[in-house]
Amino acid sequence: MAGSGSSMVYSFLLFTVVLSLQEMYRGKLASSELFTILGGFTSSIIFLVLLTFIGNFQESCGVRTGWGAVILAEAVALIAAGTVHRVCITTCFLFSAALLYEVNKISGSALSKSESKTRRH
């Protein structure tokens, strides 16, 4: 598993690459209904990698991550989606909510596994 420092760098690099590609192809993403949904999905990927970056940054500073990181990452992703198409904002929000649910579920299961390991030893 990557440490918080390297994960922070990787997530920032992914953020810049996905955002750049989305802005380069925003005309194509706004050209049809299916591509508009794809534009919302790519914006939700921006949300996920930005949330990872903010969480790792706060962890390296010793600050507890809360809902502020989620709101900031979602706001940036929605603004990026708005540059492509108005419908991308809605689809980005829906995909981001689903991704946040899955990340929370995975985080909870990983935390329960690590707690059970520390109780045994």
Image (spheres, helix red, strand yellow):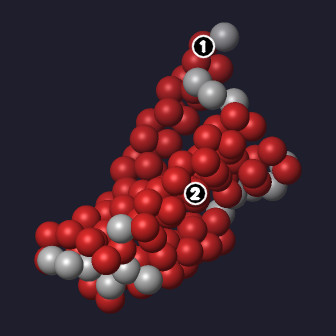
Label 1: few (<14), some (14–19) or many (≥20) C-alpha neighbours in 10 Å:
few
Q: Decide: is 66 above or below 103.
A: below
Q: Decide: is 97 above or below 61.
A: below
Q: Position of residue 17 (x, y in %)?
A: 52, 53
Residue at position x 26%, y 79% in the image: 30
Residue at position x 37%, y 57% in the image: 99
In this view, the residue farthest toward the top is 121
Q: For residue 16, which numbered disc appears in the image?
A: 2
Q: Decide: is 3 above or below 90.
A: above
Q: Decide: is 78 above or below 21.
A: below
**Which is nearer the N-term, disc 2 or disc 1?**
2
Q: Which SS class for mark 2?
A: helix
Tag 2: residue type? Thr
Viewer-proximal residue among 31 and 110: 31
Q: For residue 22, which numbered disc appears in the image?
A: none
Image quadrant holding the C terminus, namely: top right
Viewer-proximal residue among 3 and 34: 34
Tag 1: residue type? Arg
Q: Is residue 121 left or right of residue 90?
A: right
Label 2: few (<14), some (14–19) or many (≥20) C-alpha neighbours in 10 Å:
some
Residue at position x 26%, y 72% in the image: 28
Viewer-proximal residue among 72 and 120: 72
Residue 4 visible here = no
Q: Which residue is mark 1?
A: 120
Give the Cα distance between marks 2 and 1.
42 Å
